Amino acid sequence: MSQLPLSSQHIATNSSSQQQQQSSPPSSVRGATARQSPRASASSQTRPGVTVRVAPSSSSQSIHSTSAERSIQEPEEEERRCWICHGTSTEELEDPTINTHGEWKSPCKCALVAHEGCLLEWIADLQTSQHKTGKVTCPQCKTEIKMKQKDSVVLDIVNGAIKAADASIPVFILWLGSMVWIGCTVYGVNSVYLICGSEFANNLFLGQNATEFTDLNWSWRLAMGLPSIPIVLIGSRTRYMDAILPVIPFVFFVNSDPLHLTFPPSPALTLAVLPYIRGAYNSLWDRFLAPYEKEWLKVGLPAGSTSAQEAPAIQHRVEHNLDNVDIPDALQAEVEVERQWHGNVRVDNILINGTSLSRTIVGALLFPGVTAVMGSILGRIPFIRNRLPSAFHRNILGGCLFVLLKDLLRFYFTYKRAKQFRTRQVINYEKRKRASRSGRSSSSRAESEA
Amino acid sequence: MSFAVRRLQKELSKIHKDGLPQGISLVKADDFDEWLLDIRVFGENPLYKGQRFRLKFKFGNNYPIEPPEVTFTTGLERQIPMHPHIYSNGIICLDLLSPSQGWSPVQNVESVCVSIQSMLASNRKNERPEGNDEFVARNTKSPKHINFVYDDPTV
């Protein structure tokens, strides 16, 4: 929607008639008015409602204080009116305190003048509004309004740095992403060679009969599969991957190989079956061994530190105990400990969580290496070497054995720790003093002095 | 005294001294928050012949850096004019009144009235904007903050 010429004509006639009505300005100003009027009417025709550089007599207050003051001024001095606040130069002359908007400025080629303060406020508003166009133009003549500000090296540097950072973010993301991708791929290749052995891995990557590395059979399966190896390895340490893991081998490895049952099973079948073995192993462990482990882990934690979820369980156990129902030894022991000791051992949960996270990741990433080491150890045993001639199968078996050994060891250590905790005793102060007196070592004296 | 009040005092004293263009009259300007003005359209336009329309100006503290909120209101013998850019609740779709598009401090109450007067005078269509009923029923925003699309150079 645009403004009609009709409206501006309307105003133009209006303002020119105003000027005609101003019949008798003081003689000293008359010349200025005469000079000014063509410019004023010309400017007011371009836009409605704007009458700038109105003849001085239009300001009613100034009429009486005229000639003496005016004659001191230069003859060309005409009244200026700020197009933003509508304040005039005449009233400022009479009362200098009225002007709080700064110097008069004429920033464009048309007749509009304004206070610097008003202009700056308007420009700031323009630049903060949503539809900023960058350039600030005079609303009447559309001349660009130029500003200058003091250079600040610090601001320039900071602005430049922000701009450079903004520009480099996509590059950085690309760089970081490709680094991670390359790293994961290299890791993936490395673990395939570690686990499969170089012969089978070469077959996998280069095709059955390839001899040269240039025959690399790079397909989407490798491009996607290799980088995802470390991710899947880490994921397999959590329960989130339980649903996904069994599907992955079918996508990447088994696709082309027909299933045929032999002993030892083909590598593809082995890999496809592994996730199921893992699932079965995990559920067996959870069913039969995990409850004991859990109870042992609780030993050594104060009774008060059990979380709200576990509280009903303890209640349940105590009830069992009161009813003298047969309960497993481990539980019995736990209840006894509860009864004997109500101390306060604080465990820093956050620290443990942090280290256990990094332990999980590092453990997952080291797993292929450990598997290869276990495989080579198994390879030293002639019986296994005969039954499983390929390094791949020995490595897989080694990996499985390692997991089993590790879990059993952890199980054993948890048990030992719980047992050790139950032997704890608090030493009486008297006993301790006697012991240190009989010892008479310099270190113990230093200790007691401290 | 705030920026807006000083500027409005100037505008008011100018109106009192010089008067307003033909067809525009000041109805109420008791304070510097809200003014009422009546406009009439001259000429042979049958749509608005012999009618008066009432404009309500609401000024913020930041006037004239920010535009006033200008709407038509109903009253004694005052209807909302029929126009393809005037909604039946009085909201006017005019780029001049938008803070980000047409408004600049060079405008004033008089120039806004003149623009709206000419907008009516040139109109030949006896209709409301598209989607008027839905807009009137749903809109809770201040007219200043509605994002109109100013795309009609004919009106």
Image: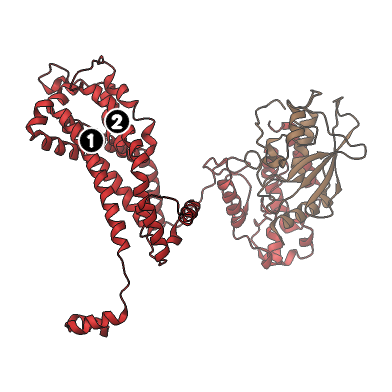
Chain colours: A red, B brown
Q: Left of A284 or right of it: where is A19?
A: right
In the image: residue B58, left or right of residue A116 = right
Q: In this figure, which residue is indicated by the disc labeled 2?
A: A277
Circle 1: residue type? Cys
| A389 versus B5 height, above or below | above
Q: Is residue B81 visible?
A: yes
Could you tell me residue A409's position as x and y percent? 24, 47
Give the quadrant of residue A176.
top left
- Residue depicted at 9% across the width and 30% down the height: A383
Q: CA distance from mark 2 to mark 1?
A: 9 Å
Q: Position of residue A273 (x, y in %)?
A: 28, 26
Query: Which chain hosts label 2?
Result: A
Say what secondary structure mark 1 lies in. Answer: helix
Q: Is B85 rendered above or below residue A362?
A: above
Nearer the observer, A366 or A123? A366
Q: Chain of mark 1?
A: A
Label 2 amino acid?
A: Ile
Seen from the viewer's position, the closer of residues A91 and A344 is A344
Q: Which residue is mark 1?
A: A400
* Picture residue at 30% right of the left edge, 45% below the top: A360
